[in-house]
Image (spheres, helix red, strand yellow):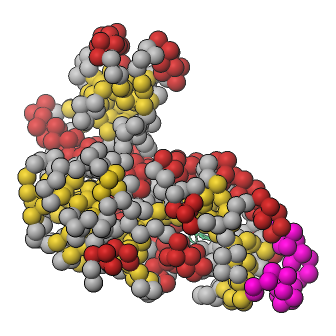
Amino acid sequence: MSQLEELQKRRTFGIVSHPDAGKTTLTEKLLLFGGAIQTAGAVKSNKIKKHATSDFMEIERQRGISVATSVMAFPYRDLQINILDTPGHKDFAEDTFRTLTAVDSVIVVIDVAKGVEEQTEKLVEVCRMRHTPVIVFINKLDREGKDAFDLLDEVETKLNLRVTPLSWPIGMGQSFQGVYSLYEKKFIHFRPHGKQDSEETVAIDRVEDQRLTDIVGQRPHKQFLEELHTIQGVYPDFNRTDYLSGKICPVFYGSAVNNFGVRELLDCFVEIAPTPLARETEERMVEPDEPKMSGFVFKIHANMDPKHRDRIAFFRICSGVFERNKNYYHVRLQRNLKFSNPTSFMAARKEVVDEAYPGDVVGLFDSGNFKIGDTLSEGESLHFKGIPRFSPEIFRFVNNTDPSKFKQFAKGLDQLMDEGVAQMFVKLDSQRKIIGVVGALQFDVIQYRMEHEYGAACSYDPIQLHKACWVVCEDLKKLDEFINRRKKDLARDKDGKLVFLAESAWTLKLVQENFPEIQFFTSSEH
Ligand code: G4P
């Protein structure tokens, strides 16, 4: 099969949700359809359990297991589906952001009772910035929840997405009868009570069809027709071009745990979701059908076993064909590397692959050559865009508490930062190191890993900071003046970029007013 045929078969996407909305359950059902797993519960057991939030040892253990579920590839119809796992745990938000850079589309899972929650808002914001096509799955319709229209409103206002429902629920909770698929013009009847497959499908082209009344009853049918009338008046018709450009977002309703509405979601997804997209680099656009191989590292996973320090770099292929044992150019290091054991993640098994195509992710064993964002190519100097770092939310000074282990301390911090566990900033005035994270638990993880993997000891001192803002100014004289006047609030990030450490939202505002020529950004790419 040619490269073009192979890449047209690929659908690479991520599922995002606020913890508990049902992402794991949905993933599992999709894998069951693809035959990638045989029994329910297979994914679930790998999940980072919520009660373990304060137990970082448990997280460490799970981190090892989660390699297996980082990428889940399975065949469906004649396609190859790649699901990239976006950790739902709140302390892993950074990792999740980065994974979103490697997908071509996302499915957002929303709990019908809770509506749009905070973490979903943040993640979808990243998708919107990148115009990633989004499908929304409203889950847990077997429970009482918010009104279906109110949920659409919430998605529009909180997620800033224009929606178009492709299925519509009849009833909810106790009185939930099923959903009518506006996309496939059929009614899917909900049959609960613990059946493996809880749905029964009836093809009904005309929504007024008496058969629908017979199934759901007169009143619910009438209400459905009225609601449909409103839908047609208020929401735009589905149009694939608008979906692909991120302008509208189709919405589905269902119940993942009951395996209800999941097949409809998957069947629509495989029809409309994008094939591997072109990617922007600082130099030019890279098209997936270009003959030469290129791609980038979006995630690095350290090996848990202290005797085997190898890490796995997750490499997304953007163009060409990736081949085992072929020399590729590592752009940052400016040298060639070849990989004898690239692994794929078919059916949750890791296996060595000889070839992989755009849209695929391969795991590359790495002894310290990779950083997040690194490019491999066939010689061209390319730098993929869209792998920004975002301002952390919690900051602390980090100290080396054992001066005799200075080297281990420096190496450990360096590698953990390459892996993207946290971000480090070095202050311009005192040269003190500050670590910034999204969830406080990462501080414990760093301390633990520094000790167990690098033999180094560290402690933290508090520092009150609101945000780290990347600073840009064309006028070098003004920039110098700014640096001189605010040195005590400035630092360099890992790439040497200048960062303003704002103590509060108020200080940030004040500084922006006082230095109008300076631009402040809360992400490293602008
Ligand atoms: P997450 O990955 O987004 O964090 O969510 P997960 O799939 O783990 O689902 C969170 C909880 O919601 C689970 O219950 C799961 O069974 C339940 N759930 C998922 N889909 C549905 C649905 O359609 N209807 C209902 N009623 N519940 C649903 P749990 O009690 O936390 O776990 P478990 O004991 O069931 O394993």
Q: Residue furthest right?
A: 219
Q: What is the quadrant of residue 288 in the picture?
A: bottom left
Q: Is residue 120 magenta?
A: no
Residue stretch rendered in magenta on the structure: 204-227
Q: Who is closer to the viewer here, 99 or 489?
A: 99
Is 464 on the left-hand or right-hand side of 478?
right
Is 455 on the left-hand or right-hand side of 427?
left
Q: Quadrant of ligand 1?
A: bottom right
Give me the residue at 53% from left, 72% from top: 272
Is any atom of residue 241 visible in this view? yes
Prevalent SS, magenta region = helix
Q: In the picture, which quadrant includes the C terminus?
A: top left
Is 109 on the left-hand or right-hand side of 292?
right
Q: Position of residue 432 (x, y in %)?
A: 25, 24
Is 188 on the left-hand or right-hand side of 175?
left
Give me the residue at 72% from left, 89% from top: 202
Q: Is residue 225 magenta?
A: yes
Is any atom of residue 174 visible in this view? no
Q: What is the quadrant of residue 429 in the picture?
A: top left
Q: Who is closer to the viewer here, 138 or 252?
A: 252
Q: What is the quadrant of residue 251 in the picture?
A: bottom right
Q: In the picture, which quadrant includes the N terminus?
A: bottom left
Picture mark count? 0
Give me the residue at 87% from left, 88% from top: 210
Where is 324 relative to 97, above or below?
A: below
Q: Who is closer to the viewer here, 461 or 70?
A: 70
Q: Position of residue 208 (x, y in %)?
A: 85, 82
Give me the residue at 40% from left, 20% from top: 518
